[in-house]
Amino acid sequence: MEKNLQFDCVPANARTNAPREKAPPGSCDSHFHIFGPYDRFPMSPTRPYTPPAALIDHYLDMAGTIGLDRRVVVQASVYGTDNRVTMDAVARFGRDTARAVVVVDDSAMPQELQRLADEGAVGVRFNAVSGNGTPVEQLESLARRVAPLGWHIQLYMKGAQVKELEPVLAKLPVPIVLDHMAGVNAADGPDGEELAAALRLLEGGHAWVKLCGYRASRPPYDNLAPIARRFAAAAPERCVWGTDWPHTQFETAAEMTDDGMLLDWLFDWVPDAELREKILVTTPAELYRF
């Protein structure tokens, strides 16, 4: 049965299980979303799904449980190019610990882009999976416009599209950050062509990858570890990690993931403490300019 275009999601777990070991001091959650309150920040009528509210206090409870001190709020597709909820969250978290990745398109005026930068935005997201955002056709023109701000381009694409666009991405005048393990299909294994294309971009020197992994796989997620380990072994200085809280697009509570478990996965993927420190602390501090 096909999903309704605006199917309802279940909420994140009310309480997060403690991980086996907390993240090191200064660790950054490089990918999560805030939704609501909806009386202040209504969703786009063309949104692809309908999440329950996911508010700052709930997020901070989770982040405190697993040990995350810094955070990057990512504009979600349900808000389109209305970045008010994301920028409000950065202001409430505080600029010393929070940054934003926003969604804008070619209609954004220079003064709007500068205002967003002044308020803590450090990048613009293209979402070719969920949609309701900036068309991929604007990738090159928007990259030229945000380059003077020092922003990066964050890409949520399937691995096949990353591979197809590899020559274009390699020549963009801004850094690029690949969402959700570059959208690779974990079932293809660590030697697949999609992963090879992503690794070439990382090796080129101006691309990073987010080790937010479960969207690259399906339960029980057994094929994720070889992909994550390949990224971390090839370019640990090009890897960051994020929870993807509140884990949208799950329709039943049985599907919902737990953030303590996700951190445990990272510790399993990267057993070396120095490399984990690089992925959780050093690299995101440089990329997001903390």
Image: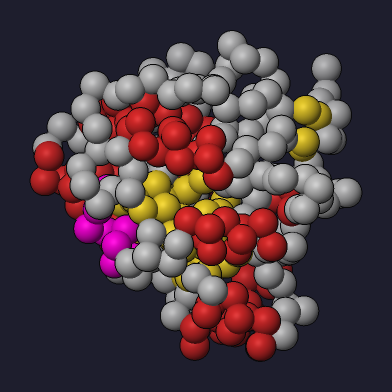
Quadrant, the C terminus: bottom left
**Left or right: 5 in relation to 69:** right
Q: Which residue lies most toward the right here? A: 45
Name the residue nearer the viewer: 272 or 162. 272
Is residue 224 rendered to the left or right of residue 244? Answer: left
Residue 217 lies in the magenta stretch? no
In the displayed structure, would residue 289 be above or below residue 262?
Answer: below
Is 166 left or right of 232, judged from the image as shown?
Answer: right
Q: Where is residue 104 in the image (x, y as percent from the top left)?
A: 68, 69
State whether residue 201 appears in this view.
no
Reply above or below: 265 against 175: above
**Frontmost residue, 246 versus 5:** 246
Residue 84 visible in the picture: yes
Between 169 and 245, the one lying in front of the other is 245
Q: Give the quadrant of the N terminus.
A: top right
**Residue appearing at x 21%, y 47% in the figure:** 25
Q: In this view, does 109 lie to the left or right of 201?
A: right
Residue 33, image x, y percentages: 57, 46
- State the count of labels: 0
**Residue 11 image point, x, y percent:** 64, 26
Q: Which residue is drawn at 76% across and 53% down?
A: 41
Q: Looking at the image, what colour scheme do you see?
A: secondary structure
Magenta: predominant secondary structure element? helix
What residue appears at the point 67 percent right and 81 percent down from the top-left corner?
112
| Residue 174 percent location from the top left of the image | 46, 76
Q: Which residue is drawn at 33% across and 22% down?
A: 18
* Boundaries of the magenta span: 279-287
